[in-house]
Amino acid sequence: MLSLADAKAYLRVDFADDDALITALIAASKDHIETFLKRPIDSAAMTAANQWTVPKTIDIVQQMLVTHWYENRGIVGPANLKELPFTVKSLLTPYRLGIYQ
């Protein structure tokens, strides 16, 4: 799980003004990843039935999502459409439940 300190270091943010926003983006990225993977990435939310070792790749993807959303704030419309990097999906897909089972 990505911490606020790690996210701020990755974003190169050295002020506290955006801490609430970055914290919300971390939570949103966690939800996005867990929905895509169909499994938890937070060990505190895991049960015996869904326990797995979360690879470091997931941390990188979470950093990428937080960075993308932090740098591309606001409503997305035709004039400012910025698609999420293909890399995010390609890095997550091997860990998605149901893909190879």
Image (tube, rainbow, N blue to C red):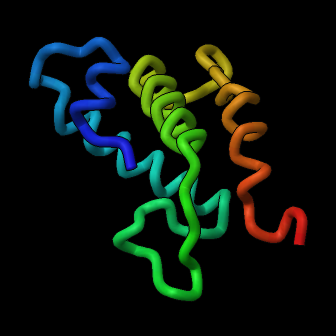
Q: Work out whether residue 69 or residue 56 is closer to the camera in this orientation and state it.
A: 56
The answer to which image quadrant residue 22 occupies is top left
Q: Residue at x 42, y 62 (%)?
A: 42
Residue 25: x and y in percent read 37, 40
Residue 85 vs 27, above or below: the answer is above
Residue 56: x and y in percent read 54, 42
Q: Which quadrant does the C terminus fall into?
A: bottom right
Residue 47 vs 74, above or below: the answer is below
Residue 32: x and y in percent read 55, 52
Q: Which residue lies furthest to the left in this view?
A: 16
Q: Which residue lies furthest to the front in this view?
A: 53
The answer to which image quadrant residue 57 occupies is top right
Image-based side of 70 in relation to 65, left or right: left
Q: Which residue is drawn at 35% across and 71% down?
A: 44
Residue 78 vs 91, above or below: the answer is above
Question: Number of marks in the image?
Answer: 0
Q: Residue furthest right?
A: 100
Image-based side of 28 in relation to 83, left or right: left
Residue 7 vs 15, above or below: the answer is below
The answer to which image quadrant residue 6 occupies is top left
Residue 60: x and y in percent read 53, 33
Q: Which residue is drawn at 65% across and 68% down?
A: 38
Q: Residue at x 66, y 60 (%)?
A: 37
